[in-house]
Amino acid sequence: MEKQKLLSLTRKDFEISTFSSGKGGQHQNRHNNFVRIYHPPTKLSMIGTSSKSQTQNREDAFKRLVNHPKFRAWLRVESCKAAGLINDVETEIDKSLSDPNNLRIEGHDDKGRWVKIDECSDEEQ
């Protein structure tokens, strides 16, 4: 069985910014080696600051982001959507909700309690 690509993420799916920290002055103006990666759909932001290398910090921040439980849950949902599995589940839910046996219609009686509409007085119907 041949595998097929369900979902593709590229650099355009993330907002990557660099910044510097530490000693001020000319040193800060020349070195932007810290990296922040932001993923808009999950609203997750990770920062890489452990190395002097911007490339290494970008890699560290990205690894932290993709290993975060919230990102992994988002990735599972998006993969299921791409495979067409979620649409099937939503269709089944819609069928289940439209079945009259699964619905219970309630209203307030004259004392303000919730009761099934069948049990309400004729005045409320």
Image (spheres, rainbow, N blue to C red):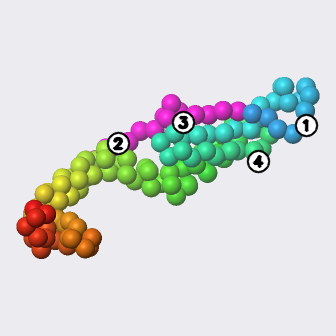
Q: Upstream in the sequence, badge 4 or badge 3?
A: 3
Residue that appears at 12% across and 74% down: 119
Residue that appears at 46% across and 38% down: 9
Q: Which residue is under mark 3?
A: 14
Q: Looking at the image, do the residues carrying marks 4 and 1 touch, with CB atoms under 8 Å apart?
A: no
Q: Is residue 73 visible?
A: yes
Q: Which residue is under mark 1?
A: 23
Q: State how far apart marks 4 and 1 are (Cα).
A: 16 Å
Q: Residue 76, relative to residue 103: is it above or below?
A: above
Q: Which residue is under mark 4?
A: 50
**Which quadrant: the C terminus?**
bottom left
Q: Position of residue 45 (x, y in %)?
A: 61, 45
Of labels 2 and 1, the one closer to you:
1
Q: Upstream in the sequence, badge 3 or badge 2?
A: 2
Q: Residue 84, relative to residue 104: is it above or below?
A: above
Reply yes or no: does residue 90 show up in magenta: no
Residue 43: name its quadrant: top right
Q: Secondary structure at mark 1?
A: loop
Name the residue type under label 1.
Answer: Lys
